[in-house]
Image (tube, helix red, strand yellow):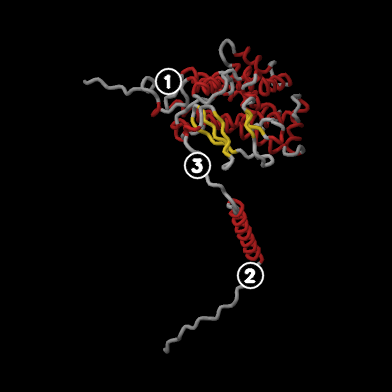
Amino acid sequence: MPEEKYEPKPEVGKELNRRDFFLKLGLGSLSIAAAGTTVFAYQFLSPNVLFEPSPIVNAGRPDSYPMDSVTLDVNSGIYLIHAKEGFFALGAVCTHLGCLTAWKPELGIIACPIRKGLSMAKTAAEYFENLRESRVWRSIFRSGTGASTLHRSLAIQQNIFLHLFSTKVRRRMLSFSATWYLGTLTFGTFVILVVTGILLMLYYHPSVPQAYADTKDLQFVVSSGLFLRNLHRWSAHAMVLLVFAHMFKVFYRGAYRPPREFNWVIGVVLLLLTLLLSYTGYLLTWDQLAFWAITVGSNIASAVPLLGNKIHFLLLGCNLVNANALLRFYVLHCMILPLAAFFFIGIHFWRIRKDGGLYAQQSEPAAVRPQPVEKEAQ
């Protein structure tokens, strides 16, 4: 059979659909905008300077200027100041109107003649420094001003809010592998729960005929009510998970050893408070699932020997889950337990700093680091 030669077919122009057209139009517009922004930024950051004076000025010999003197060099337009720390040069042209300033030795200031000998305007840093030297500021922050390590330490140690943070911290303790930020994430979920809980309280009544209706209103009527309720719920689940993960991390890394054993006890108390917060909030929806869950939990508590019935009555305020239990759980969930959690969280953060910062075994001192135990020879 004779061989057939392959002849390519002529390409037919591809039709551009609407999606590709607008995509290319958008990319082209972005490219033009980016190019224009780049040109504008380049022109703005590199202006044309018509005249720039030389940074080097020949002021003569240093011994021609006595100690603590202020001399005006009219040709260069600068003041030459000879102090104990050395020589300083200040511009003599006023930045207000461009006139030549004058040195007032009787006042100890460099003043503008147009402003009738008044001192130059203070900067924001000078105003802040004067504020820090005032009596009101010193009554609150008693350490005074200064950039030394002593002043910084005193400023932190004498302030309850700043005392939660260290003056210095090891870089190793801030790494992700050391803590996984589980404590920070737990505190973040607690803050979310507080904020969303306050917003949900605006539309909730802790009464038997109204609690369930308010829950339905938050879900279907109130604007963003479903979002706030779900955010509160999932943040509560995440906080319980993060607290357990944080406790496991601390336990397996041995961070409960001295000198951190007291803070470990505080962490256990915070774990119990977290579980109680989750448990007391379970009843507030006042539906069938919440009612029977609290019934089962209170019956388990009543099975405790000797004190079971008293614990059951103290938990519910009565013998059955009714309006008294709902009100008691509402007060516990919205007032008593959050305040206790804030109190113990403050102690927890404070003890972290007093115990030497976050636990990182590689950066612990030898007296704190657990030593390997050698086996005795058989």
Which kind of residue does numbered mark 2 sit on? Leu
Q: Position of residue 372 (x, y in %)?
A: 32, 24
Indicate which disc, 3 or 2, sits on the residue closer to the N terminus: 2
Which kind of residue does numbered mark 3 sit on? Asn
Q: Position of residue 168 (x, y in %)?
A: 48, 27
Q: Position of residue 302 (x, y in %)?
A: 61, 16
Do the numbered discs 3 and 2 sit on residues whose CB atoms are within 8 Å? no
Mark 1 is surrounded, within 10 Å at the Cα level, by few (under 14), some (14 to 19) or many (20 or more) other residues, namely: some
Determine the secondary structure under disc 2. Answer: loop
Indicate which disc, 1 or 2, sits on the residue closer to the N terminus: 2
Disc 1 target residue: 257
Q: Position of residue 310 (x, y in %)?
A: 63, 12
Q: Quadrant of the N terminus?
A: bottom left
In the image shown, does 217 or 142 lie closer to the viewer? Answer: 142
- Which labelled disc corresponds to residue 58? 3
At 63% across and 65% down in the image, what residue appears? 20
